[in-house]
Structures are given as C-alpha cells and as structure tokens.
C-alpha cells in the first residue's frame, strides 16, 4: 500500500467544503428526475444520516453550479440548511460539454437495485423484527412493494410463524 498520498490532491473529494446554500444553484441541462417517494426518502436520509456525499459543483463567477447532486442540493435548501457540502470538479473541465458529460456519467453510473437483492434485504429486515411500515419508510417503498419483495423471496418462509386454517374439508 502506498504511503505517499500526494496523488490524492487531484481528486475533488479530498477537498470537501461547506459553502452558503444560497450560492449553490442548479445547472440548465440535467435530464435526471426523481419521483416524489424517492425525494422523500432522500430527505429522510439526510435528516437521519446527514450528508454522506458532497454535491459536485463547478465554480462560477456567481457561485457554484451543480454538476451532480441536484436533489441533495434541493433537499438541503428545503431543510433550510445555511451551508451545503460541495466538491469542485477538476479545474480542467472548463467546457460546458465536459460538465454535461460528467453529469450524465454520474447519473448513469449509479445503476439500479436488483429485485432479488432487494427481496433479500426486505426479508432480512423483517427477520430483524422490522414491520412493513418501518421497512417501507426506511427504504422508501409503498406497502405493496414491500409485500411483493417478501413474496419474491419465499412467501412460505416469510409467513412460517403464522397459523392458517385448512381451506378444504374432506
């Protein structure tokens, strides 16, 4: 393992700053949208866990233009935070096209949660005595989504502690 960390200075994450929220603003090209349930989940996440990722910005003459993290920026302002955590994208990214490409790369690189893995997570939380309401709130899911994810992983296992009457009599 390399002991000399000189190379880290080239990474924006090495220089997180808290800047006044009122000078951080959206770009005019981000095609990403977040549905209301996911926005509520992001709000809950920031309220519960704090900011765990800074907002990626480009420094302008008037403030900081968001390259990635528009929704984190929006929630921070909604929560009336006076300052937001930012990192400034590498200074050689001066062309707007470079920043647009960076925004798209950030958006697309996040991927999607796989259904099977999410089902395992929901089942694990249920085994930890989390009720459906808590699972839904903490993971940003509607009750029917929680139920479907439980069913995918094995309906019988999830309800093995329940008693059922026989449907038919011989």
Image: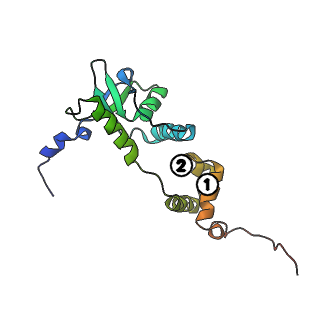
Task: Of the two numbered discs 2 and 1 on the same chain, state the one appearing first in sequence.
Answer: 2
Residue 25, above or below 85: above
Residue toward you, 17 or 24 = 24
Q: Residue 92's mark? A: none
Residue situated furthest bottom in the rendering: 170
Q: Disc 2 on helix, strand or loop? A: helix
The answer to whether mark 2 and mark 1 are in CB contact below 8 A is yes
Displayed quadrant of residue 164: bottom right
Residue 109, above or below 164: above
Q: Is residue 23 left or right of residue 2?
A: right
Residue 156, above or below 14: below
Residue name at image x 31 percent, y 31 percent: 57
Q: Is residue 42 left or right of residue 169?
A: left
Q: Residue 146's mark? A: 1
Residue name at image x 63 percent, y 58 percent: 148
Query: In x, y percent, where is residue 91?
Result: 20, 32
Displayed quadrant of residue 11: top left
Query: In x, y percent, where is residue 120?
Result: 52, 62
Q: Which residue is mark 2?
A: 139
Rounded to the nearest angstrom, the CA distance separating label 2 from label 1 is 9 Å
Residue 11, above or below 1: above
Is the N terminus in the top left, top right, bottom left or bottom right quadrant?
Answer: bottom left
Query: Do we see residue 159 in this rendering?
Result: yes
Query: In x, y percent, where is residue 144?
Result: 66, 52
Neighbour class for label 2 at 10 Å: few (<14), some, many (≥20)? some
Q: Is residue 31 left or right of residue 54?
A: right
Residue toward you, 67 or 126 = 67
Query: Do we see residue 88 in this rendering?
Result: no
Query: In x, y percent, where is residue 107?
Result: 40, 42
């Amino acid at each position: 393992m390399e002991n000399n960390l000189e190379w880290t200075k080239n990474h924006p994450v090495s220089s997180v700053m808290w800047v006044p929220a009122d000078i951080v603003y959206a770009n005019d090209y981000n095609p990403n949208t977040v549905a209301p349930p996911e926005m509520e989940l992001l709000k809950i996440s920031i309220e519960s866990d704090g900011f765990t990722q800074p907002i990626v910005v480009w420094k302008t003459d008037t403030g900081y233009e968001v390259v990635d993290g528009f929704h984190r920026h929006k929630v921070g302002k909604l929560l009336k935070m006076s300052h937001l955590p930012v990192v400034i994208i590498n200074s050689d990214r001066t062309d707007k096209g470079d920043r647009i490409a960076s925004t798209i790369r950030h958006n697309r690189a996040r991927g999607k949660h796989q259904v099977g893995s999410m089902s395992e997570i929901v089942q694990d939380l249920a085994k930890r005595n989390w009720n459906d309401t808590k699972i839904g709130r903490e993971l940003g899911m509607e009750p029917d989504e929680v139920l479907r994810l439980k069913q995918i992983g094995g309906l019988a296992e999830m309800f093995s502690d329940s008693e059922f009457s026989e449907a038919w009599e011989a």
